[in-house]
Image (cartoon, grey):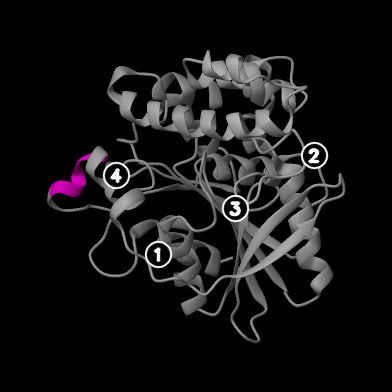
Amino acid sequence: MPIIRSTYNPKGIFRNPDISTIYAATLRQVPDPGFEKERLELSDGDFLDLEWSRVFGSKKIIILLHGLAGNANRPYMKGMARIFNLHGWTALALNLRGCSMEMNRKFRSYHAGASDDLAEVVLHVLHLKQFDKIAICGFSLGGNISLKYLGENRSIPKEIIGGAAISVPCDLAGSLGAINRMRNFIYSSRFERNLKQNLLQRAEKFPEYISKDTIKACNSLRDIDELYTSRAHGFENAADYYDKSSSLQFLENLQRPALILNAKNDSFLSPSCYPQHLAENSAELFLETPEHGGHVGFVLPGTHFYHEKRCLEFLNSL
């Protein structure tokens, strides 16, 4: 029954979910871990831009996946890379398709269920023959990809020891409903604005597939998923995309231990994103739901945040 009793108890203003979320995402300063860039050519002719933070002689590596409209240089990515580096792990931070400085080659980009791209990164790491242990850690959308990968009916390399997912919307439709609530208007508007800006650039490159007028007509995140995310990635519509990509359905079949750390006051998550019943009946799913933390906002005094310490502790124990 791997339900974990959380010890996270922030003080003062960081008990407020919006303050913790915004501070962690925009105000936190994290030293650059010294990322080295690599372009990984994918099997379909596209590419991923990877960011390496190496520890010389390390046999352990953590692969990091960012959230919606994010990239490898977000504070939460650099913070996780830094704490693992300090404890002897090499870190590899992914820029999902279209999320680095250069637009990817294909009309498709990334989405919450893009576990095949993660699988190609894992194979790339294995081909280097440098690492005995591989762990996966994803934030928000990247957490959903990570859990889906670990629970799908696929061959998981023996070097994969487990994973962690932070503030993960494991029920995509439920999470969308939560984000669309009026209290989250500022957040949803920012996501929508960023995604539309990206799509407008994509329309210049692929005018035969999508038009600027249809992009500008989108008034919600679901509209964007109906217009682009679902169709560009082989789904019938947004509902089909949410249904097939949500990691919730894969949690019963996790092939490696996985930690989910979801704050109860995370306004981006629906009740279905806290799979307590599954964790109670699973040997591999470890669920921790602290009262506070907002969305990837587990602030602590000092250099390292709570979620970074917990992921390190969990993955070091495997």
Q: Which mark is residue 153?
A: 2
Labels 1 and 4: the sequence-earlier one: 4
Q: Which mark is residue 101?
A: 3
- Can you tell which of label 1 and label 3 is closer to the viewer? 3
Provide residue 234's location: percent of width, then percent of height: 78, 24
Question: Split into 4 quadrants, where in the image is the C terminus?
Answer: bottom right
What span is colored magenta in the figure? 13-17
Q: Residues within 10 Å of mark 3 (few under 14, many from 20)?
A: few
| Helix, strand or loop at mark 4 | helix
- Residue type beneath disc 4: Ile
- Can you tell which of label 3 and label 4 is closer to the viewer? 3
| Helix, strand or loop at mark 1 | helix
| Helix, strand or loop at mark 3 | loop
The residue that disc 1 covers is 309
| Helix, strand or loop at mark 2 | loop
Query: Marks 3/4: CA distance?
Result: 24 Å
Query: Marks 1/2: CA distance?
Result: 30 Å
The residue that disc 4 covers is 22
- Can you tell which of label 3 and label 2 is closer to the viewer? 3
